[in-house]
Image (tube, rainbow, N blue to C red):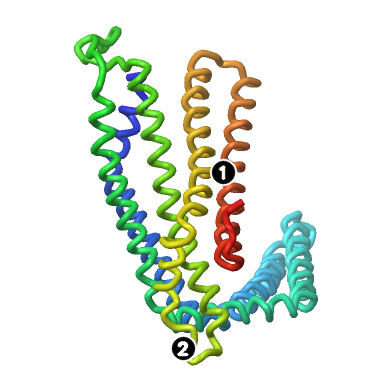
Amino acid sequence: MKDKVTSYIADIAYCWKVIAICSFTAIVLGYLYLLVIRCIGAIIVWISIILIQLSLIGAGVYVYFQADTYPEDHDYNSYLRYAAYVLFGVAACFLCCICCCWKAIRIGIAVYQTTAEYIGKNLRIFILPLITYIIAFIWFGGWLFSFVYVFSIGEPVQREDPYQFITEVKWSDQTRYIVIYQIFMLFWLNAFIMGMCQFIIAASAVIWYFEVNSDTGGSGTVGRGMWWAFRYHMGSVAFGAALIAICQLIRVIFEYYRRKIQSMTKNAVVRCLLCYTGYLLWLLEKCIKFITANAYIQVAISNTFFC
């Protein structure tokens, strides 16, 4: 009914089961991945490499023998043989890449083994993402409760035909600014909660790295990572979260005007430019998130501020 915010809330109401199931599945898969890293981290790399190589060779052999099912003068016979040769060539190139990148693969395996050792010494790292999700969910519930109240502030008026039997709340400029502010705070606090989790993990890994050969063996570093985060570097995490929130708010505002413009014009060039701009804003957000995550790691390593 030309009311996008209401339609978004309705979408969440209709799809909350799907959202809950997907969120739970993501958490479970994340924990399973951590368990697998801890148990057989190094084996996974070699198994993956061997399976890829055998799959390429096996696919080439299968396609090659499938060519014999057609007469020699048939086009499919030639096509399948050429496809088999291509698969054999890809398998050879993959084997050459493995041989050339042997040192990098060994470094990657060492990283996996080091990660498994770190997790074994700091099992509390398993519950940290779960606590983060719970806190984020509680924050979103409180935000949604307050947002509904702000959303309802305004003058109820009758909609245009053919929905004149339904009222619509007309916002004032002040209400509209408050709504934008609340959306920004949703993004900011959400990014801050996730950023604190990232920083605690980074700080814990840094402490473990320098204490793994000490008497403690690098255990109990998650608690000290929390102390570092809440005592010394909350400002850096908040600043990085603000950068992410600004990018997300720009994307939301652009998406709102993009829908308005697309509803008023059918020009293909305009639509392509709008889609391209939306992609660039999405790419900007991804870059900011990547830079911010690495900045948190540098803050933990060097004990400096975000900038």
Residue 270: x %, y % from top left: 62, 20
Q: Looking at the image, which residue is at 59% across and 37% down?
A: 281
Dot 2 lies on which element?
loop
Mark 1 residue type: Glu
Q: Is residue 147 above or below residue 167?
A: below
Q: Is residue 79 above or below residue 279?
A: below
Q: Looking at the image, which residue is at 39% across and 35% down?
A: 183
Q: In this rendering, would 89 be left or right of 252?
A: right
Q: Quadrant of residue 121?
A: bottom left
Dot 1 lies on which element?
helix
Looking at the image, the residue that sits furthest to the left is 165
Contact between labelled residues 2 and 1, with CB atoms less than 8 Å apart: no
Give the numbered dot on residue 26: none
Give the numbered dot on residue 285: 1
Residue 73: x %, y % from top left: 79, 58
Q: Is residue 65 above or below residue 188?
A: below
Q: Looking at the image, which residue is at 45% across and 49% down?
A: 191
Q: Quadrant of residue 106?
A: bottom right
| Circle nearer the viewer, 1 or 2 | 2
How many marks are shown on the rendered structure?
2
Q: Quadrant of residue 93?
A: bottom right
Mark 1 or 2, nearer chain start = 2
Residue 81: x %, y % from top left: 76, 64
Mark 2 residue type: Thr
